[in-house]
Amino acid sequence: MMKILVAVKRVVDYNIKVRVKPDGSDVDIDGVKMGVNPFDENAIEEALRLKEQGKAIEVIAVSFGTQVNQDVLRHALAMGADRAILVESTAKLQSLSVAKLLKAVVEREQPNLILLGKQSIDDDAGQMGQMLAGLLNYPQATFASSIKIEGNEATVTREVDGGTETLALNLPAVITADLRLNEPRFVKLPNLMMARKKPIETMSADELGINLEPRLKLLKVNEPPARKPGIRVNSVEELLNKLRAEEGITL
Amino acid sequence: MKTLIIAEHNGKQLSPAVQQAVTAAQFWQAPVDLLVAGGNDAIVQAAASITGINRVLHANAVYLAHPLAEDVTNLILSIASDYQVILAAHSSFSRNILPRVGALLDVAMISDALTIHADNTYKRSGYAGNVHNVIRSTDNIQLLTVHSSNFAAASLGGSAEVINIDVPASFTKTRWISETHNLSDRPALSSAKIVVSGGRSLGSAENFEEILAPLATKLGAALGATRAAVDAGYAPNDIQVGQTGVVVAPELYIAVGVSGAVQHTYGMKDSRIVVAINQDPDAPIFQVADYGLVADLFEAVPTLTAALN
């Protein structure tokens, strides 16, 4: 029976418009509503479904950061994860650092499957799963839209440009979730209450002896140029005239 | 100093984005080699005809007929010590492979660079294009994918030397099974020239289909939807446009009954022309629309469809 590890990143809620700090040093997330990275919710949901199908016995959620990350781990527990691990670090963690930290957790927990979101909606890098698979020399399947487990093999359909690709991976393996994989369940209040009783273990990233110095230095953050103001048209006919005559679009 | 480009192909032809990656690679003013993993003679010849490259390295093996990330990674690692810059056009192919390469070279990767500012400094976007970050890599090897539409295509007509290179042993823990290609009459959402998107105001899955599909068909457009419409069950998840869906930048984006939540506008605001049709004159979508029509979509859209050639 499988043990599944899912990683949960705490990001700015997808409904919030982020602002750049006046000095252009970074985005301003002070006091901004945070939540679970949406693609990570797909990963948690899939892990829970595999458990409900009897394919897995345990779902472990892990997050990297400070104590504030307790909230996203509680969310994973409320969805149904069995236990959680917080790897504490105050460093600015980039994909490569997180992959190295997660590798250390994998070596300790020995999961058969590591299920991750395909990317986070803040950095949009989409790297960590592939990096982890490389470090572990595990099979990988990114952008998964379907996962089937039979014995020691995962059959994964991936969303690729212009179609899909289906792969069979020997477990243990790393799979990253695309949005199409599933629709994550809503967390009900009683589950949130019950999740408070589930354990969150805290580990210190420093004790893992991994150099977490960011390799990519952020020099400047700015907002892209705004769109020029538009105009109102009064009818479909006027709209078509404008698009044809002023924008040169053939319709 | 040398630069390596990982050339994408689909088994039949070379991806046109390779020509754009070649232009990006010229920034370093170093000899550029193109690595073709698998592929046939026509693909290799097409690669060799791109001007501005030094050599085409062709790696051929039965197991490279459908190149896996694990195998292409090992292939790149087998020659990586010759290169200070390794890059590819940003796509599902390169995004799958290069982070794995980065981890094994212990190099941080730069995904989807919009512009190259210096030999280790780039602009890339975050928050689905809502912010632009200028970043500098401190690694000795530059490993990146580039946003190919920001770079002109290198011309054809060259004849670079082609070298067959040895391949490492295959990675046996992953097996390719099959692939499918989108055969829909509609263009793919991410590359369509026109996108027609619907929001929650459509009111039902039936309305979504009956109101928007004829317009999209007439325009040869892809269909998109907001997260709200997807959550309400009006449209499938895979056509969601926005921060948690697909990011699009077509010539023409027509937003029908879309309120304009930030998570949606993140995903479409780089479209050349945005048209919004919405009954609510205060809907935020009008702030990003070039042409706004305040109207009942159930009347305006059929009128628009009927008025098209």
Image: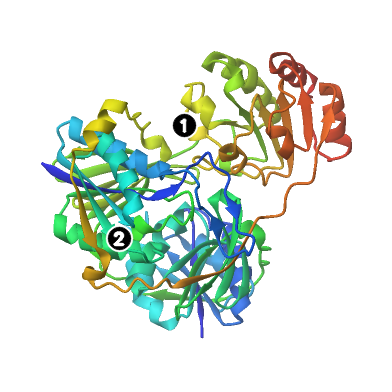
In the image, B35 versus A179, the foreground residue is A179
- Which residue occupies the extreme left position in the image? A1
Seen at 29% across and 65% down, the residue is: A100
Q: Is residue B170 visible?
A: no
Image check: A167 left or right of B144? left
Name the residue that disc number 1 marks.
B237
Q: Residues within 10 Å of mark 2 (few under 14, many from 20)?
A: many
| Residue B74 percent location from the top left of the image | 32, 68
Q: Tags 2 and 1 in contact by the CB under 8 Å rule? A: no
| Picture quarter with the N terminus of chain A | top left
Q: CA distance from mark 2 to mark 1?
A: 27 Å
- Determine which quarter of the picture holds residue A222: bottom right
Seen at 70% across and 29% down, the residue is: B219
Image check: B18 left or right of A148? right
| Residue A81 percent location from the top left of the image | 23, 39
| Residue A105 percent location from the top left of the image | 21, 59
Let me know if marks 2 and 1 both belong to one chain: no
Q: In the structure shown, which secondary structural element does the residue marked by tag 2 occupy?
A: helix
| Picture quarter with the C terminus of chain A | top right
Seen at 46% across and 57% down, the residue is: A125
In the image, B308 versus A94, the foreground residue is A94
Residue A132: mark: 2
| Residue B83 percent location from the top left of the image | 46, 80
Q: Is residue B147 visible?
A: yes
